[in-house]
Amino acid sequence: MRQKFEEFVFDGDTLLGSQTVVNKTQGVPTLGIQLGLSWWLFDDMLNVALGYQFEQWWSVGRTDDSNADLTTHGIFIRGDFHY
């Protein structure tokens, strides 16, 4: 993970600025759930799935003063062709 923060201020005739860069490696706990139904079509050559998916990622981008969680969820449709 790499985070970069910059700030610039124009004070009359002078431009002032500062920058902070944080590099860190970390593990992120996750949870993923899919619920749905699937159907085999065309003599078991095509599998179609429809359902709902939920994912939660904790402490993504965690540094000393920064922290974020990520949540994704929604409906999915998937098709697999087998030959």
Image (cartoon, helix red, strand yellow):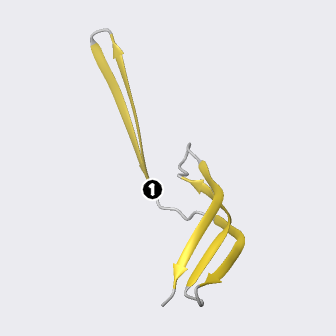
Quadrant hosting residue 79: bottom right
- Classify residue 29 as left or right of residue 15: right
Q: Nearer the viewer, residue 30 or 9?
A: 30
Task: Give SS at disc 1.
Answer: loop
Q: What x and y, as percent, mark residue 65?
A: 56, 42
Residue at 64% x, 84% y: name it.
40
Q: What x and y, as percent, mark residue 17?
A: 34, 27
Quadrant hosting residue 31: bottom right
Q: Nearer the viewer, residue 48 or 26?
A: 48
Question: What amino acid is labelled 1 in the image?
Answer: Met
Label 1: few (<14), some (14–19) or many (≥20) C-alpha neighbours in 10 Å: few
Please give the residue where the numbered disc 1 appears in the rendered image. 1
Residue at 61% x, 83% y: name it.
41
Q: Number of marks in the image? A: 1
Q: What x and y, as percent, mark residue 26?
A: 52, 62
- Classify residue 24 as left or right of residue 79: left
